[in-house]
Amino acid sequence: MKKDVILWAGAGQIGMAIARRIGTGKKIVVGDKKLENAESTAKIMNEAGFDVVPAQMDLSDKTSILDFIKTGQTYGEVAMLINAAGVSPSQASVETILKVDLYGTAVLLEEVGKIIKEGGVGVTISSQSGHRMPQLTAAEDELLACTPVEELLSLEILQPENIKDTLHAYQMAKRCNEKRVMYEAVKWGERGARINSISPGIIVTPLAIDEFNGVRGEFYKNMFAKCPAGRPGTADEVANVAELLMSEKGAFITGTDFLCDGGATASYFYGSLRPDK
């Protein structure tokens, strides 16, 4: 008997925490650019009683994304999507960040939305960074939301002369994620399915540790020290939000983004993290 399938992109700590919450009784296909990461994650999950198969999947490559989806479909109907794949400002160039975090996420949401099972649900991991960048115009937001995926990287606001650095590229990518979720929620809704995003703050993962040790390390450490929570978060706390969004208790929630940042964004605008303080 075929099981409902979960497509899980990005074999990291946040994705694993979510998969553990929602994966019981389902077939899980975990994709990562590095197959060995997917294989080691699948081993951990299978040894905990889940049914997980690894796959190679490059979020910057549409063909790779389509192959990943087709792999999932060989096991049954795709009922859920967890997109936790991406790169950070300290890990990649401007070009790579836009190709992976912006373009790749848009492709994945669109293509899964074409085949998602009725009653299906997805969640993509964005970032608090998308909430802290300078305000875009309504027209610019609409371009990020609605531009055909193959034209996204040609937008004027995403050209090299308009991107200051890798942090700015990351902020633009995450802003696009949030707007793209709104746009895709309309299309997913036509299939009776839902899609949302979560914008974590500083969550302790290997990616975050790279940031702590990178050029913006002190900035990030100051951020979680001065946010209302006074600490970084954990992958399981992000999974708490995802579990709500992907369960029947979240059945009336779609096309939205949830900040899960310990209040860092609130402090950035109205507290001790304000840039002018």
Image (spheres, rainbow, N blue to C red):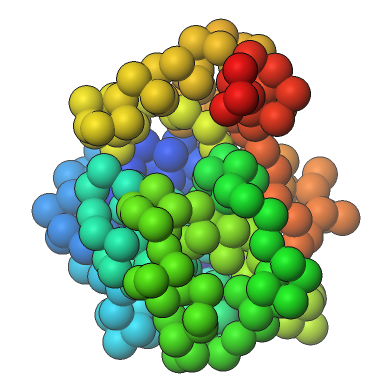
Q: Is residue 223 visible?
A: yes
Q: Say if 107 sits above or below 141 in the image.
A: below
How many labels, in total? 0
Q: Residue furthest left?
A: 36
Q: Give coordinates of residue 9: x percent, y percent.
A: 38, 60
Q: Give coordinates of residue 122: x percent, y percent.
A: 61, 61
Residue 228's quadrant in the figure?
Answer: top right
Point out the image quarter for the C terminus.
top right
Residue 269's quadrant in the figure?
Answer: top right
Q: Is residue 77 visible?
A: no
Q: Give coordinates of residue 43: x percent, y percent.
A: 21, 44
Q: What residue is rendered at 79% in x and 48% in y?
A: 250
Q: Say if 65 sits above or below 97 in the image.
A: below
Q: Would residue 231 appear left or right of 204 to someone viewing this image?
A: right
Q: What residue is rendered at 67% in x and 73% in y?
A: 140
Q: What residue is rendered at 51% in x and 81% in y?
A: 156
Q: Say if 150 sits above or below 55 in the image.
A: below
Q: Give coordinates of residue 130: x percent, y percent.
A: 58, 50
Q: What residue is rendered at 57% in x and 27% in y?
A: 275
Q: Would residue 189 appear left or right of 233 to someone viewing this image?
A: right
Q: Say if 237 sits above or below 226 in the image.
A: below
Q: Nearer the viewer, residue 215 or 182?
A: 215
Residue 254's quadrant in the figure?
Answer: bottom right
Q: Would residue 122 appear left or right of 15 to someone viewing this image?
A: right
Q: Nearer the viewer, residue 64 or 92?
A: 92
Q: Nearer the viewer, residue 207 or 6?
A: 207
Q: Nearer the viewer, residue 67 or 106?
A: 106
